[in-house]
Amino acid sequence: MDENKRSGRQGSEAGRWLGAILAMVVLTTLAGGGGLWARAKLQTVATAKPVDVTAPTGRAIGYVEAFRLSAGGTLHIQGWAVSPDVARAVEVFVNGRSQGTLLLELSRPDVAAAHSDLPGSAESGFSGDVVIPSLRQRMGSVEVVVVDRKGLKTTLLRQSVYPDDYRTRWHDPLQGRSLDSNDVFYFPIATSHVGEGGAEGIRETFAPYESRTVKVGIRVQILYMRTTTGASGDYAFDPDFALDKKCGERFVAEDSLNRVMRFAIEQKMPVLFTLNAGFWADAPCDAPQWDINDVLEQDENLCQWNEKNQVMPDKALAAQPGSFDSPELGRSLSLNVFAERARFYKRRNLQQASAIIQRFATQHPDLFIGVNLDPDVYMNPFFEGRQWYDYNPQTLRQFRDWLQGTGAYAGAGGPGAPDLSAYRRQRVLTLEDVNRLTGKRYDNWRDVDPPRKFPTQVSQFWKDPWTQEWEHFRRHLVKLHYDELSQWVAQTGVPANRIYSSQGFMPPGELIDPFPVRLDSPAKNYDSGGMSIEGSVPAQGRLGAIIYGNSAVNAIRMEGRTSLFSEFRRFSPQWAVVEYNTADLLHPQRMAPYDQAYRSLRDVSNFGARFISPMAWNGSPGETAGSKGYVSYTSLRRTPLEEAIQQFMMSRYDLPRSARLWTFGAGMHRDTDQWQADAGGQASATVEGLRLQLGGDGRVSVVSPSELDVRSGAFDALIVQAEGGGNGLQLGVDMQAEGGAWQALVLEAPLKQWPRGPAGFRIPFPVETALGARPYDRLRLAWRGPAGEAVVIRSVALYPSRRDASAQPAR
């Protein structure tokens, strides 16, 4: 990170297919799988670096160095500000209303030295106290704004503030309850150069909002095939790899394992380790003197081949827009199980690194979040739409064995090959079956060949049965690779519930099929690179998802009726988000707004994820939005996403991770949280919460979002914070299985009969529900009171039962 804050430096291609019966557009890069995802991430890697703060033309710049809110409601702030049009004062706004003004009159020689060209820089400092009005148990927003002599206003800081009771709101329900690591939700923030200040400011920014159940940490990548002892040490993993080594102008690596662990111990900062030897690990530059991946890729027999039996040069994509900082993406190692030499080094080095991490986890259990493995495992996706992979001869050997259930799939793969009997197809094929599927006449298995032509202007290749078999095999290869990586790590003692994959899930283009959910989902009208949700769940671990933009807000088209997050939960109930931003990869200049961040965090948590790793602490600061070099999807500091994370941490302060919570915007904006009034009722989002209007009969019902997937006994209470409705307000709670009728969960009773704490009324649930083993999909809150009165619901929570979460099976 390079803020220097005190001195003030702050195509896609389209292919068209016209059929005899209908016209269809096949956007060969706007796909939900490997192609666009990989190409968009080229831009991410290429520009994910610190950006100096420079003043947009005619605008002020500055920095708020102190921001402290006392229990009595007095805000102390100090900092500096300058403007080409002479900064006059700093004004403080609370929820859009001005609360006070501070003059710019303090001497700042450091700012004068950095901005001698701007008027008033020598006396650009401000410091003082502003009284903040009561926020009445709701979130508030404070803005510090510079006003210049022309009246132009520039926001220096937007900060969430919350009344002191957020620390005690969930205290009572937590009394007498034992907590373990599964009750904690983490925000491991992606960063690098941690030994050189790359994590500076994380603790200061988020520590006030940390609790027993919500914590912040860091995520750092460890390049286990690149940070090695070199040729003289047979490329063994080196946890003390010297970070001064370069290839060209680039550093070989930015972090070493032991340095990261020392930092975590010294700073008491939990860590998620990204163990990376995938596409991105050796992409910046060629370093064969240290990187065993670069050495192995020199052997074409170990690499992925295209449909023309070619292995492209590693720099084949160096001239592609966005790949300037990651030019070494033209070739990658094959995933077939017969690549004995590549598999030896990968397994050995991965286990050397994970064994050290396991010792760290044993000695410092509170500092270990987990490991996530090889981000973006695909059949080489960077040529998507132009070349197809993997036609390596040994991969084709494995394809033939997989089809007929022989070789490694019968435990006879030969020296170095694993026993894949557990992956044997339920229905193996005969040569006659293959001939029927291909429309060819193969006399022996050695000649069987996968499809090599994918004509978008001649036929719908994705509907060809032989293409289906090839696509299912490629998904199997990706699944097998994640399975093996997780098994190798688990063999060193790292628990399976701390091991995560790292697969990207890109929103599909408008006329592109949604990406595959299952291993046996139909083939798609683009090159998916072998990606699927099911195939991204490791055998000895959990799903780690990489999501941006609409994927991050659970708002993309899917194969079926269920949402993306629901599918994540179905295949891996305690999944996690290992790389994340609510900004869109396709619109790098567009900062994502607060409401998207709020909804994304709400839903990721309510669908059961264990943590979210935001991108990126040393990416583009929010104040550089609109300037050259700004990249929204690596922007976290001083952005709406950072603010939403703070709000999330406060709303869930001491609330166990597995709780479901809806806060209806938490006072920062208006949101129904997808709760809707039943037919004839009225429900609207207000700054105070969800407002319900009791009808002429004194009744109104509000229904929760669907896909709750609440199992019997998982929650022991509903906690509702509500006001209004007059005397005698009553509440009943109903439940509904998917597609079923509503059934009573809690009979209607006066609301005041239930015990009330700072979090609201606690309404106990029966141990067993009328639905038995079936999960319920939705809740309905049925209110009754004086006709015409209004009820405002501030929050609704499903509070988890007291049974030990660690006793649940790791999935």
Image (tube, rainbow, N blue to C red):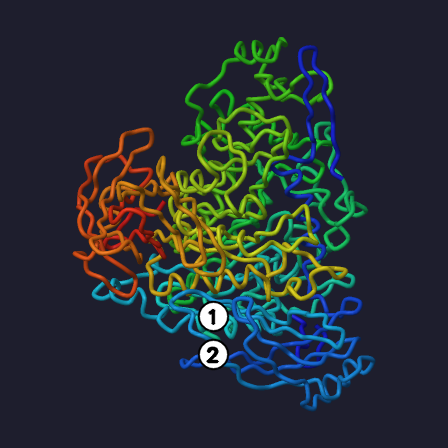
- Give the structural element (helix, strand or loop) at label 2: strand
Q: Is residue 50 above or below residue 600?
A: below
The one nearer the camera, 596 or 539, is: 596
Q: Which residue lies at the image location 45% right of the left edge and 75% below the top edge?
A: 133
The residue at which mark 1 appears reads as 161
Dividing the picture into quadrants, the one containing residue 18 is: top right
Is residue 806 visible to the viewer in this orientation of the structure?
A: no
Q: Which mark is residue 69?
A: 2
The one nearer the camera, 483 or 5, is: 5
Q: Which mark is residue 295?
A: none
Q: Position of residue 666 (x, y in %)?
A: 43, 59
Quarter holding the C terminus is top left
- Looking at marks 2 and 1 on the same chain, the residue that comes earlier in the sequence is marked by 2
At label 1, which amino acid type do we have?
Answer: Val
Residue contact between numbered discs 2 and 1, judged by CB atoms under 8 Å: yes
Q: Position of residue 746 (x, y in %)?
A: 20, 44
At label 2, which amino acid type do we have?
Answer: Leu
Q: Which residue lies at the image location 70% right of the left edge and 14% below the top edge?
A: 19
The one nearer the camera, 517 or 709, is: 709
- Give the structural element (helix, strand or loop) at label 1: strand
Q: Is residue 617 above or below residue 510?
A: below
Left of 227 or right of it: where is 704? left
Q: Position of residue 375 (x, y in %)?
A: 57, 48
